[in-house]
Image (cartoon, helix red, strand yellow):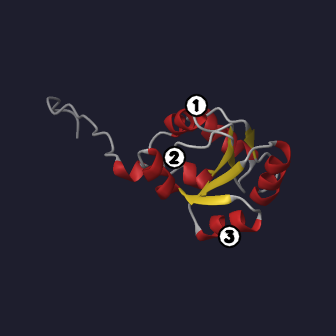
Amino acid sequence: MNGDSDMTLAFELEALKEVASPEEVFEDARSWTTYIGVVSEKPTYVVTNFTRKNRVRQDFFSGPRGVDESLSGVKGQFDTDRYVFIGASDDDEVRAEKLDWEYLDIEDAAEAADWTMAAETEPEEIETDSSRDDWP
């Protein structure tokens, strides 16, 4: 996804949950975007908890507003050449078109930027101590 650095990039929360490492995605995207954040219809605390847990530092977030109002507000607040919304559903694509944002599906974005999707990673194997006789 390298290219135009005068860009505002917004992730829909559910799309961001599909990558293996949101922290690495944000770190990478910061090198080629001007502003980056997360928007969602979920309550503010859900987004805040997710971003804190995953060490994601964002320039903006939905707050108590929904995605439509957030994207409109971000576009009015941050002056960049491009506004790109990364989502994970047909509704996200319709929303982006309606609000005059470029839309990119998370899987396409991950492929272009070489991000690892969570579905591509193997869950860590749980080690068990088979030497204990008293453990079921």
Do the residues under discs 1 and 3 have CB atoms within 8 angstroms? no
Residue identified by numbered label 1: 55
Residue visible at 20% across and 31% down in the picture: 129
Judge depth for marks 1 and 2 and give the one in front: 2
Looking at the image, residue 35 sits to the left or right of residue 14; the answer is right
Q: Reading the chain from its start, which is encountered first: label 2 or label 3?
A: 2
The quadrant in which the C terminus is found is top left
Judge depth for marks 1 and 3 and give the one in front: 3
Residue visible at 20% across and 33% down in the picture: 134
Residue visible at 59% across and 37% down in the picture: 32
Cα distance in 3D space between marks 2 and 3: 22 Å
Amino acid type, mark 3: Val
Residue 111 point in image, percent of width and height:
43, 52
Q: Secondary structure at mark 2?
A: loop
Cα distance in 3D space between marks 1 and 3: 29 Å
Q: Reading the chain from its start, which is encountered first: label 1 or label 2?
A: 2
